[in-house]
Amino acid sequence: MIQTPEMLKRAIEKLYMDITEPLDPYVALALTNLSIKMAETAYTMGFQDGRSAKP
C-alpha cells in the first residue's frame, strides 16, 4: 500500500489547524481530518499515475 509521507500529512494538519483555529474545535478537527484524507487520496493518485507513465 502506498503511504503518504508523514511530513506532508503533518504540514497539511498544521496549515489547516492554523486556518481553522477561530472555529469551534470539533469543526476545526473535522475540516483538518477531511483535508488530510483528500491529500492522501491525491498523493496516492499521483503516485500511481507516475508509476504507470514510466516505460
Image (cartoon, helix red, strand yellow):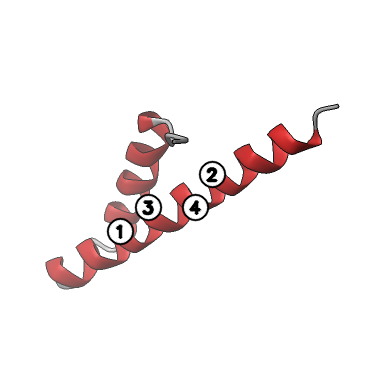
SS at mark 2 in the image? helix
SS at mark 3 in the image? helix
- In the rendered view, does 36 fall on the left or right side of 55? left
Q: Give 31 or 15, whichever is nearer the viewer.
A: 31
Distance from the alpha carbon under mark 4 to that under mark 1: 14 Å
Residue that numbered label 4 is attached to: 41
Looking at the rendered image, the disc whose residue lies closer to the viewer, 2 or 3, is 2
- Three-letter code for the amino acid on which mark 1 is drawn: Thr
In percent of the image, x 63 and y 43: which residue is there?
46
Q: Give me the disc on residue 36.
A: 3
- Three-letter code for the amino acid on which mark 3 is drawn: Ile
Q: Earlier in the sequence, mark 4 or mark 1?
A: 1
Q: Position of residue 33 (x, y in %)?
A: 29, 58
Q: Give me the disc on residue 32.
A: 1
Residue that numbered label 2 is attached to: 44
Residue 9, picture quadrant:
top left
Distance from the alpha carbon under mark 3 to that under mark 1: 6 Å
In percent of the image, x 21 and y 62: which residue is there?
29
- Three-letter code for the amino acid on which mark 4 is drawn: Thr
Distance from the alpha carbon under mark 2 to that under mark 1: 18 Å
Distance from the alpha carbon under mark 4 to that under mark 2: 5 Å
SS at mark 1 in the image? helix
Labelled pair 3, 1 in contact (Cβ < 8 Å) = yes
